[in-house]
Every structure is written in structure tokens, then in C-alpha cells.
Image (cartoon, helix red, strand yellow):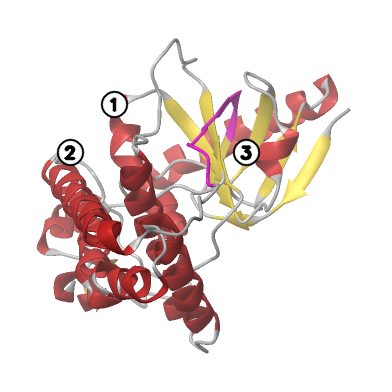
């Protein structure tokens, strides 16, 4: 039986493909007391996890493909900034020393406190940065318990693979350019999340904020990702499949028609010229600006330069 879920449209377009479930390590956090003579060793173990996480992120930033979205490097740099902030790099050590507890539990206590602070922020964009903080915390935790932070995309993926995940970090999307990824969906994320921004920048159909999609999908199951209306359809019947195949053809045809006129002057029937300006994040976007026939820059998103 088909299941229809509604989320937030991120990357535009329509994709029909086989689901590939992203499985991460357990999120269960161990909790135990640490004796006085082992507290220094526990603090050193946390420090080692911070250093390992920093090395991972720096390597990922250095491995970003040239054709990757400009935002990707900025988001990974943001994760590095969060990692080096004392609230994540030092305060968990203070907690484990004061309460004589293990590093994993001290990290959880601190992340819960920070998450509550993010939830109280009025600004939507800043509130969404909680997910970035939690992604960094997950990396630290995995390094503490010896689990890999890489998503496993090895194996025989279909050419029409749709990634199904609870959440995807900016670092995860580095792998997208090397794999057969036709679309992705996540349970987490909102309109201003970095997952949504990257979905748009990667220009692949994506729907986020589905809450429990991953629990309802089995490996290799056929799914439809409607990145125009923010809809995910699980196990569609033949009637729905045929309709979405038609819609996908129409969408591709529409994009081709738009590409034909992208260099045409934007002039109304009565001779008034309309200036079309582009939103950019860096100087590298100027090439795309010319490719799409824009007249200039309307908005320069300076936060990426700042980051």
C-alpha cells in the first residue's frame, strides 16, 4: 500500500528511484561513574576525540570537489568553529571532572543544555543551527566510542538511488558527486537548515523534515521524491508511477525550454526592460551568473564570506 508523506521541499525536481537507507552507529549514550584516579585519563580521552574530529573535518574541507556548491566549504568551516568553541571543546571536561562521570555522558549533558538554548532563539535561521551543533556532537561521540563518521555508500547502488536518512550533514554531501545519487530525503531539517540549502545548491530533488520516513521505508523500495511540492511517496502503484513519470518529463522539458531563452533580453511586450539580478555567495558564482544570463548581482550573501 502506498504511503504519502509531506515535508519541506528543498531541491527542486521529481525523482523516481530505489531507496538506500543510511544507517549510522547507535546513538545510545553510555553513563557510568569514573573514579578520581581515572578522571585525568577520561579528560584526555575527550581531548583526543576533539582532535580526531577536527582532523576529520579539515580533511573533508580539503577534499571538497571543485564543482561542489560554494556553501559546502562554509558549512564545514562552521562545524569546525562550533567544535573549537569552549562550550563543546572544554565545558564537557569541566562537567566530567565535577560530576566524576564518563566523557560520553558529559558530552550529552552539555549538548542537551545547548540544544535547549538554541530552541529558545526567536530567529528561525539561528534556531536551525541546533542541527549543526548536534551533527558536531555526533562526530565527537562517535570518535569517543570508536565508530566511523562516514556514511557507507559502498556496494552496488542503483543509478536511480534515493538516499533515505534521519539527517545529512554538509560533510555527508561531499560524497554525492562521486555516487549515483538521484535524490535524497531526511527526517530532520527545516526550510532554513543547511540540509535544505545544500539540497537547492546540489540541484537534485530533495524533501526534508519528514519526521519518520526512514522507519517506513525498506531497502531498495521504490519511492517518488517530489521536490516541487515537498512530497514523498513510498511504494507507489502503477497509476501514480505513470503520472509522476509524466510530470517528471514535463519538468525536464520545461527546464530545457527555459534554457533556450536564458540569454534573451527580459523585455515586456510594450518595450520595458526588466533587470534580472542573481543572488551569489562568492566570486566563484560569477561564472554561473554569466551562464544563466543575469544582468548583475542583486544579493551577495556575505555570511559565507564571513564564515
- Indicate whether 237 appears above or below 175: above
Residue 23 inside the magenta-drawn segment: yes
The mark nearer the N terminus, 2 or 3, is: 2
Residue 65 inside the magenta-drawn segment: no
Boundaries of the magenta span = 15-27
Q: Position of residue 33 (x, y in %)?
A: 45, 59
In the displayed structure image, the side of residue 196 where residue 215 appears, left or right: right
- Indicate whether 109 appears above or below 73: below
Is the residue under label 3 in contact with that under label 1 (CB below 8 Å)?
no
Q: Is residue 138 visible?
A: yes
List the residue tagged with mark 3: 225
Q: Which mark is residue 178?
A: 1
- Tell me the quarter of the image containing the N terminus: top right
Residue at figure coordinates x 29%, y 32% from the top left: 177
Query: Badge 3, how many Cα within 10 Å: few under 14, some, many 20+?
Result: many
- Tell me the quarter of the image containing the C terminus: bottom left
The mark nearer the N terminus, 1 or 3, is: 1
Q: Pick whichever, 38 or 176, lies toward us.
A: 38
Residue at figure coordinates x 24%, y 61% from the top left: 43
Q: Position of residue 212 (x, y in %)?
A: 70, 47
Q: Is residue 269 visible?
A: no
Residue at figure coordinates x 29%, y 69% from the top left: 93
Find the residue positioned furthest to the top.
156
Cα distance in 3D space between marks 1 and 3: 21 Å
- Indicate whether 153 appears above or below 228: above
Amino acid at each position: 500500500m502506498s504511503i504519502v508523506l509531506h515535508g519541506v521541499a528543498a531541491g527542486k525536481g521529481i525523482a523516481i528511484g530505489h531507496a538506500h537507507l543510511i544507517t549510522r552507529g547507535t546513538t545510545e549514550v553510555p553513563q557510568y561513574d569514573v573514579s578520581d584516579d581515572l578522571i585525568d585519563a577520561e579528560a584526555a580521552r575527550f581531548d583526543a576525540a576533539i582532535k580526531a574530529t577536527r582532523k576529520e573535518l579539515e580533511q573533508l574541507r580539503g577534499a571538497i570537489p571543485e564543482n561542489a556548491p560554494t556553501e559546502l566549504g562554509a558549512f564545514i568551516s562552521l562545524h569546525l568553529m562550533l567544535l573549537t568553541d569552549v562550550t563543546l571543546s572544554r565545558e564537557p571536561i569541566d562537567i566530567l571532572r565535577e560530576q566524576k562521570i564518563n566523557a560520553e555522558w558529559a558530552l550529552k549533558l552539555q549538548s542537551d543544555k545547548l540544544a535547549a538554548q538554541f530552541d529558545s532563539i526567536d530567529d528561525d535561521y539561528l534556531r536551525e543551527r541546533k542541527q549543526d551543533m548536534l551533527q558536531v556532537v555526533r562526530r565527537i561521540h562517535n570518535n569517543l566510542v570508536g565508530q566511523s563518521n562516514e556514511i557507507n555508500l559502498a556496494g552496488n547502488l542503483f543509478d536511480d538511488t534515493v538516499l533515505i536518512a534521519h539527517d545529512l550533514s554538509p560533510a555527508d554531501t561531499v560524497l554525492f558527486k562521486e555516487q549515483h545519487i538521484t535524490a535524497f530525503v531526511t527526517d530532520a531539517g527545516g526550510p532554513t537548515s543547511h540540509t535544505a540549502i545544500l539540497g537547492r545548491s546540489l540541484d537534485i530533488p530533495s524533501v526534508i523534515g519528514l519526521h519518520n520516513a526512514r522507519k517506513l521505508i525498506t531497502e531498495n523500495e521504490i519511492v517518488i521524491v517530489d521536490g516541487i511540492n515537498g512530497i514523498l511517496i513510498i511504494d507507489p502503484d502503477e497509476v501514480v508511477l505513470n503520472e509522476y513519470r509524466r510530470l517528471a518529463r514535463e519538468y525536464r522539458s520545461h527546464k530545457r525550454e527555459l534554457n533556450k531563452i536564458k540569454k534573451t533580453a527580459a523585455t515586456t511586450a510594450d518595450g520595458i526592460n526588466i533587470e534580472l539580478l542573481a543572488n551569489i555567495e562568492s566570486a566563484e558564482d560569477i561564472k554561473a551568473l554569466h551562464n544563466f544570463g543575469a544582468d548583475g548581482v542583486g544579493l551577495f550573501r556575505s555570511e559565507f564570506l564571513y564564515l
